[in-house]
Image: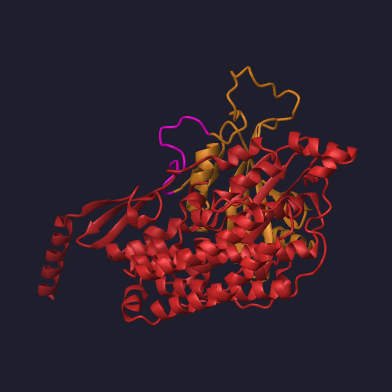
Chain colours: A red, B orange
Amino acid sequence: MEEVKQSDQAYHYQEEEKQYSYLNLGPTHPATHGIFQNVLKMDGEIIVDAEPTIGYIHRAFEKLSERRPFNQITPITDRMNYCSAPINNMGWHMTVEKLIQAEIPKRVQYMRVIIMELARITDHLICNAVIGVDTGALTGFVYMFQQRELVYEIYEEICGARLTSNIGRIGGFERDFSPKAWEKIHRFLKEFPKVLKEFENLLERNRIFMDRTIGVGGITGERALEFSFSGPNLRAAGVDYDVRVAKPYSSYEDFDFTIPIGTNGDVYDRFMVRQGEMWQSLSIIEQAIKNLPDGPFHGKVPDFYLPPKEEVYNNMEALIYHFKIVMGETDVPKGEVYHCVEGGNGELGFYLISDGGRTPYRLHMRRPCFIYYQAYPEMIKGSMLSDAILTMSSMNVIAGELDA
Amino acid sequence: MEGTGLEKTIGVLNEKFEGEVLHAAMLYDFPTITLKKDKIIEIIKFLKEHPDTRYHYLTTLCGIHYPELNQIAIMYQLHNMMSGERVRLKIYLPAEKPEVPTLTTVFAGANWMERETYDFFGVIFTGHPDLRRILNVEDMIMFPLRKEFPLEDQVREDKNDTMFGR
């Protein structure tokens, strides 16, 4: 008994004497894939504590949008999660459409689903490829980036832009998908499954990859819910919450798809959930193309949707609407509305308060990254430095969305 | 969600917190309840644990400034994933001294959301473990999302905005 006590004291003595080293990971470090700073308190190579600092690219989106008419806020939303910008755009359009209670034709909803699922594929594809890079598999990354390029060409064909797409309008699309866009979509659908399969073969059952990722950076489902996780990170922890199913928007109820979930919430599960979602997205796109209804490519919301140029020059009414929209003189109903979409990283919500003026009175964006990144110190405690890098990339923290 | 969620939540609230509800309405598809500010944390905890509501997920939290009322509203948005019901709770605080107890005791995820609200509106969340600025620089002296800080430079003379709204 006496002996045990003595050794206990000796242990405590050692604890006090222990010296920690501090490591500054970031703000600009090639392995953090963005501007994040973490001051890590290290015991040898084990992380004892982490102190994240964010806000390096804060651009005051919420303040900016208080001075911009509704259509001018779309480009702001692009710059949040720039890996899947079209989803942000669509989320914003749908929020405004909910506010003005616009009716959106079925065809537009299906076209939106196609674009949103393409964006989800690019988002997950980058995230998974980067997990590969951080475990040392650069090949998959280069290979997958070629496929992202194909999707960006589709965006280009539809809206003219690539990364910050500003795609669509409030009420629909500015033009129908051109034959060339359809051709590119079909080409992507034909080529991508093969590449994705190869990527899967490269990593999914790869001994090195599995050793590096299984059991790393895990979080339990309960803890994830307490931290308000959403999206693939929550699903990897075993909670099957997906906005597309829980509260379908843009006709998601018409499609048949499953939600892949994980069990441990670790890096491998997150990787597998994203991988599964890409296959589901492909199937949704195929269903949408197969069942694409005929009809107009925009809804009847003349107060918000810019009329075609020929009409502006030849039609009095169109000219009036054009003037009103460009000068931001449209009447907007008063009210407050919350709309959420399943973004690349989870529930992307727009909480819009309108007081009837030309701009929102207040626009709050629920950015999934910002909310779940706060669990990062807890997730990396007790792990190695190299695992911390891997955990960050598997959480898919996008600096633009984090800092707004 | 056709109003039933709202009535149910009000019913549950009245079990224990009679008289706390100031106003309740469906705003578009969203039940919104305005409450007195004093017992907000107890109320959220109660709604989280009550078997009828079980709002176990904090979707988001933000501030809204109303200069003409001289008040800052805090909006909490709760969610029950099993039933798909959501509720929005609002409290109003005086703009000179906005203070409210922290929600981090109930939801760990409220930590950064509250820091963000502090950062932009200057709302003091008493009992918060680490109430510092989060997105803006540490030595900033103002709370930028308050309406008294206009977005554009006020000394500019080349631009006349009087014709076009805000």
Q: Nearer the viewer, residue A57 or B46?
A: A57
Query: Residue at the location (33% across, 54% down)?
Result: A30
Q: Is residue A43 above or below residue A264?
A: above
Q: Is residue A239 above or below residue B146?
A: below
Q: Please give the range of residues in magenta.
A: B129-143
Using the rendered view, name the quadrant where residue A314 is placed.
top right
Does the magenta segment cover residue A127?
Answer: no
User: Taking A277 as reference, is A183 left or right?
Assistant: right
Tag count in the figure?
0
User: Taking B165 as reference, is A8 left or right?
Assistant: left
Query: Residue at the location (64% across, 60% down)?
Result: A341
Q: Quadrant of the N terminus of chain A?
A: bottom left
Predominant SS of the magenta segment: loop
- Point out the residue furthest to the right here: A316
User: Taking A12 as reference, is A71 left or right?
Assistant: right
Residue A279 in the image: x percent, y percent? 56, 76
Residue B101 in the image: x percent, y percent? 53, 47
Q: Is residue B120 visible?
A: yes
Q: Nearer the viewer, residue A77 or A384?
A: A77
Query: Residue at the location (58% across, 31% down)?
Result: B96
Residue A36 in the image: x percent, y percent? 39, 50
Does the magenta segment cover residue B141?
Answer: yes
Q: Is residue A229 visible?
A: no
Q: Nearer the viewer, residue A382 or A57?
A: A57
Query: Residue at the location (29% across, 54% down)?
Result: A40
Residue A71 in the image: x percent, y percent? 70, 44
Q: Nearer the viewer, residue A172 or B88?
A: A172
Q: Is residue A132 above or below residue A352?
A: below
Q: Is residue B102 above or below residue A191?
A: above
